[in-house]
Image: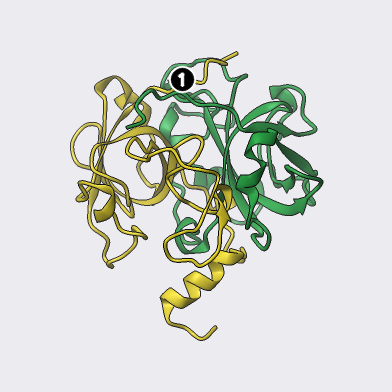
Chain colours: A green, B yellow
């Protein structure tokens, strides 16, 4: 049983953003999104075998810059209080960040070319998983209070 | 800076499966998938505010039953070696599990009704995030070596 709940970084994420205010709200903008990199520690490079042919990955990372916060707050683009589990705020009880990213191949051993990251440069990488349309893709999902925000951002009719 | 890399459970996942061999390969089968539950520790319940209206969530959990493993292995349904980061195996450097689940509302304070989980009963819960079609949904993604397996499972023409 692994019950110590201790993580170890497997590498580092390299992005163009050097502090939290500089990070984009949505890593898919502008389009095309900037090229980022995941640099694996040498000992973990064998774990990349078979990654070729996958167009998208899920990356998990440790949001080391996120300060602890209360469980309820008003998001910056909102006018009501929301619980942290109804937001993607980095300030969460366990600051694990998740991004679905576009995988554009390797740039040397252990260096992955990625798009759609939105985190600070130097963020510790925790895991890489294949993105599976069979279990990770829900095109018809309702986003609750976040639907309103997404609609406003797309400039479409409500 | 949060650089101690230590997690704390925020609750427990309740599923019908009491050991790893009993867990389904894909939590969406059979259809309809069994009803599961996430039970939050009382101190984290305020963080659920605003979750109503979301049809799908991402849950992260600690795969405490997963034994450590090498970085390269032959998956049970495959005939070639793959690196752990090209698989969704629970045996990974950081045993964080991820499921996109259907959210069917609350069953009392701090108890979420969920479908599509595939983990062992009693699995420690780490995080709940809203599933966002704007950043989490990639219907056209290629799954690389896993495409072959998914095609075989659907019994469609290759």
Residue A151 visible in this rendered orientation of the protein: no
Residue drawn at x 44%, y 26% is A81
Q: Is residue B121 left or right of residue A93?
A: left
In-front residue for pair B103/B28: B28
Image location of residue B37, percent across then percent down = 24, 43
Q: At which x and y percent is residue B39?
A: 24, 34
Residue matched to label 1? B6
Secondary structure of the residue carrying tag 1 is loop
Camera-nearest residue between A156 and B23: B23
Q: Nearer the viewer, residue B116 or A127?
A: A127
In the rendered image of this protein, does residue B18 appear above or below residue B49? below
Identity of the residue drawn at 73% across and 22% down: A19
* Residue A27: x %, y % from top left: 69, 42
Is residue A43 left or right of B115 when viewed as pictured?
A: right
Q: Quadrant of residue A124?
A: top right
Q: Quadrant of the C terminus of chain A?
A: bottom right
| Residue A99 seen in render | yes
Q: Residue at x 52, y 62 (%)?
A: A133
Hey, which quadrant is residue A77 in on the image? top right
Residue drawn at point x = 19 percent, y = 41 percent: B107
The number of numbered badges drawn on the structure is 1
Label 1 crowd bin: few (<14), some (14–19), many (20+), radius 10 Å: few
């Amino acid at each position: 049983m692994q019950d110590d709940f201790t993580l170890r970084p497997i590498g580092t994420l390299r992005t163009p953003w050097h502090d939290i205010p500089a990070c984009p709200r949505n890593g898919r903008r502008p389009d095309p999104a900037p090229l980022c990199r995941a640099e694996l520690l040498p000992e973990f490079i064998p774990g990349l075998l078979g990654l070729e042919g996958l167009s998208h990955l899920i990356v998990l990372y440790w949001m080391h810059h996120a300060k602890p916060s209360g469980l309820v707050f008003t998001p910056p683009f909102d006018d009501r209080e929301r619980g942290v589990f109804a937001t993607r705020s980095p300030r969460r009880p366990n600051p694990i960040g998740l991004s679905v990213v576009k995988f554009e191949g390797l740039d040397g051993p252990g260096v992955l070319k990625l798009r759609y990251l939105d985190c600070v440069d130097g963020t510790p990488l925790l895991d890489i998983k294949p993105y599976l349309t069979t279990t990770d893709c829900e095109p018809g999902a309702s986003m609750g209070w976040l639907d309103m925000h997404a609609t406003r951002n797309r400039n479409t009719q409500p």
